[in-house]
Image: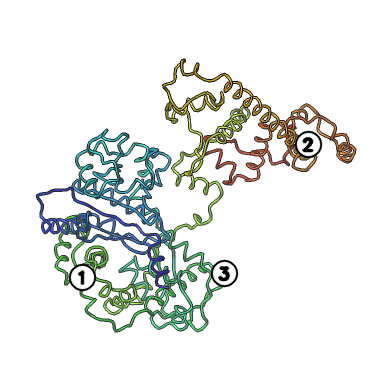
């Protein structure tokens, strides 16, 4: 059971490491002091975007990690991002920007899938790079993605190790040859496209909705908006034991509910909305009928209140008071607060004002979770944070009700119900493809279907390996290579083996003259016999194949193919189809007509494409990956038989 729980905790986790450029003159104690100073500098510099960010599970964090083995001392962080993949890519953006702001730092980032940056740019990676040899090759330096190449030939590049480099080797190579290890433009563009738009993109990932919540939760969320994530997760992952605490609410009484505006991430909002849940009658949380104009606000508030109650039920209300003062007691807090002020975190707010205090409380929690990182035995749980705020932050229900009359409008949630076209566009954007231009009527009429069959033939003719099949490349993208040995081997296959070849290359004409004449006769007789036997085998095989074709021709499978002879005939009438017995009797003696392979191939692909009804499917996905774009299907009639179009 514990092993399974451990596996669960490792899911959807991203790890990041920040190394200093090697300096042999720097002693270990000095290195530790410098790295710890970098934590304060980094976290205070990026506080304006990190503090208000709502994380799915865990926030971005950094701590000092001492050296071990060949891995030098460095800064390390780990974040469990759960179902919100955007958290992971936001961290990629932050790491990239850190190396841009601090050129003396080199960063590595990976998740439970390994080198996910290489996965994102898989279409543009060099052929030699694979998961087995990518260890310690992918880094961020000076805001750019770097890939340490492998030497093409031994000793070709003295500065490149022949095996995957160690961390110290990689750091030395990157610092000494930053331009030579720069990833290709296409690889960098793939990663940059995925993080394009940050930090402005953060606002686009949020969703604001009206919720009918107990006043205590409203007060907590005003101080710590990020706690909405913990509450949603508690409700989303609830179990029967959790729901026992919600039979009768002890912390958040339903009679104190007021309307408020809550900020979610789109992922959290979707998780909350899609859950179907009926509250216990004893809880006091009753919902209006679905036709009520504020039904959604009541439902969201009820679910969120259950999440907060579950969080508080998991801790004792009399937990240790020593946890409450950890932030202000830390020796790093004073200098960290000064760094925040220098970086204009408080935006000119007057010290002591309500808004200043709200940002200060957010900064304290940010410091506690991301900078100070106390031991788990001393760290506050979300429930303890909530109870602490309820005990220390006074709030007036009447004042909160006054704010209820001036709420900002909530966001439109129609993005939850995407049309097929919008979904296709999102998938294309996620895949990094350009938005396809609509095909004009003239282009549609002039569309040449031969490129469909030619592309498919090119795909089938490719030789697949253990790494999978390769799709046909554009002529401009295909690398030009020439392998002399393979070229000669192809000739051997075409011309047949050379029987008189010897293992030695030193034989001359005199050696051939020494061969006995009787041996020559025996050899010729043996070869003639083998040739006759081989010819007989081929004849038998052709006979079997012809018989199989004849039998299959009269089955439903055989009749589904279009032959070349059918193309020149009128479509069979209904009367003719009723006389199938008469046709079958004479068909056995008729000559087999060859199947038109190209026509059948195109017809079947078009039929598959038509059945997709404009959605993504195997036919469109395969053709688009080969660079073939079919025009939209504007013919909604029943599909005509091949040869009638």
Label 2 CA crowd tier, 10 Å (few <14, some 14–19, many 20+): some
Q: Position of residue 444 (x, y in %)?
A: 61, 31
**Which residue is found at the position 62% from the left and 30% from the top?**
449
Q: Are marks 1 and 3 in contact (CB under 8 Å)?
A: no
Separation (CA) of disc 3 from disc 2 = 65 Å
Q: Which of marks 1 and 2 is nearer the N terminus?
A: 1
Q: Where is residue 32 in the image (x, y as percent from the top left)?
A: 15, 58
User: Relative to residue 272, is residue 347 drawn left or right?
Assistant: left
Label 1 CA crowd tier, 10 Å (few <14, some 14–19, many 20+): some
SS for dot 1: helix
**Which residue is found at the position 40% from the left and 55% from the top?**
85
- The answer to whether residue 165 is seen in the rendering is yes
- Looking at the picture, does residue 389 appear above or below residue 36? below
- Looking at the picture, does residue 122 appear above or below residue 444? below
Q: Residue 550 carries which label?
A: 2
Separation (CA) of disc 1 from disc 2 = 85 Å
Q: Mark 3 points at which residue?
A: 290
Q: Which mark is residue 95?
A: none
User: Relative to residue 403, is residue 327 drawn left or right?
Assistant: left
Camera-side mark, 1 or 3: 1
Q: Hey, which quadrant is residue 170 in on the image?
A: top left
The foreground one among 171 and 603 is 171
Q: In which quarter of the image is the N terminus?
A: bottom left
The foreground one among 346 and 626 is 626
Q: Name the residue under label 1.
A: 327
């Amino acid at each position: 059971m514990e092993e399974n729980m451990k596996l669960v905790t490792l899911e959807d986790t991203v790890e990041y490491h920040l190394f200093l450029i090697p300096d042999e003159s720097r002693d270990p104690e000095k290195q530790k002091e410098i790295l710890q100073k970098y934590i304060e500098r980094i976290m205070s510099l990026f506080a304006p975007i990190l503090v208000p960010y709502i994380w799915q599970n865990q926030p971005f964090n950094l701590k000092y990690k001492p050296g071990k083995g060949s891995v030098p001392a460095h800064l390390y962080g780990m974040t469990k991002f759960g179902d919100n993949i955007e958290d992971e890519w936001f961290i990629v953006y932050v790491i990239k920007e850190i190396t841009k702001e601090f050129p003396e730092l080199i960063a590595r980032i990976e998740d439970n899938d390994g080198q996910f940056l290489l996965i994102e740019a898989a279409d543009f990676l060099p052929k030699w790079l694979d998961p087995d040899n990518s260890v310690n090759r992918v880094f961020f330096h000076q805001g750019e993605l770097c890939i340490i190449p492998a030497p093409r030939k031994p000793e070709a590049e003295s500065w490149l190790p022949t095996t995957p480099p160690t961390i110290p080797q990689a750091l030395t190579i990157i610092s000494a040859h930053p331009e030579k290890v720069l990833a290709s433009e296409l690889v960098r563009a793939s990663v940059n496209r995925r993080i394009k738009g940050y930090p402005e993109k953060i606002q686009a990932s949020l969703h604001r909705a009206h919720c009918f919540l107990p006043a205590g939760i409203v007060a907590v969320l005003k101080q710590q908006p990020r706690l909405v994530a913990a509450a949603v997760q508690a409700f989303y992952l609830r179990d029967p034991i959790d729901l026992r605490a919600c039979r009768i609410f002890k912390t958040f009484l339903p009679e104190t509910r007021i309307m408020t505006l809550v900020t979610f991430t789109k992922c959290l909002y979707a998780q909350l909305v899609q859950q179907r849940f009926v509250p216990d009658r004893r809880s006091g949380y009753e919902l209006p009928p679905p036709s009520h104009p504020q039904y959604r606000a009541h439902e969201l508030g009820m679910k969120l209140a259950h999440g907060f109650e579950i969080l508080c039920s998991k801790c004792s209300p009399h937990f240790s008071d020593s946890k409450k003062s950890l932030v202000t007691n830390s020796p790093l807090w004073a200098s960290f607060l000064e760094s925040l002020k220098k970086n204009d975190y408080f935006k000119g707010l007057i010290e002591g004002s309500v808004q200043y205090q709200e940002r200060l409380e957010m900064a304290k929690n940010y410091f506690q979770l991301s900078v100070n990182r106390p031991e788990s035995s001393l760290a506050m749980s979300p429930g303890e944070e909530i109870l602490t705020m309820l005990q220390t932050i006074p709030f007036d229900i009447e004042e909160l009700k006054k704010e209820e009359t001036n709420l900002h409008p909530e966001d439109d949630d129609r993005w939850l119900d995407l049309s097929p076209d919008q979904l296709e566009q999102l998938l294309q954007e996620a895949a990094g493809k350009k938005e396809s231009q609509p095909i004009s009527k003239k282009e549609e009429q002039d569309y040449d279907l031969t490129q469909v069959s030619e592309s498919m033939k090119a795909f089938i003719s490719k030789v697949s390996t253990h790494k999978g099949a390769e799709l046909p490349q554009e002529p401009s993208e295909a690398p030009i290579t020439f392998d002399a040995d393979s070229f000669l081997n192809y000739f051997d296959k075409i011309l047949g083996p050379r029987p008189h070849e010897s293992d030695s290359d030193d034989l001359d004409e005199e050696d051939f003259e020494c061969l006995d004449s009787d041996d020559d006769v025996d050899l010729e007789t043996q070869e003639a016999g083998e040739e006759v036997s081989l010819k007989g085998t081929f004849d038998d095989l052709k006979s079997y194949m012809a018989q199989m074709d004849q039998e299959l021709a009269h089955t439903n499978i055989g009749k589904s193919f279009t032959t070349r002879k059918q193309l020149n005939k009128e479509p069979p009438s209904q009367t003719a189809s009723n006389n199938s017995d008469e046709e079958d009797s004479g068909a056995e003696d008729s000559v087999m007509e060859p199947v038109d392979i190209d026509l059948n191939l195109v017809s079947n692909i078009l039929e598959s494409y038509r059945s997709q009804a404009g959605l993504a499917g195997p036919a469109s996905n395969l053709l688009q990956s080969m660079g073939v774009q079919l025009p939209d299907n504007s013919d909604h009639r029943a599909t005509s038989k091949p040869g009638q179009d």
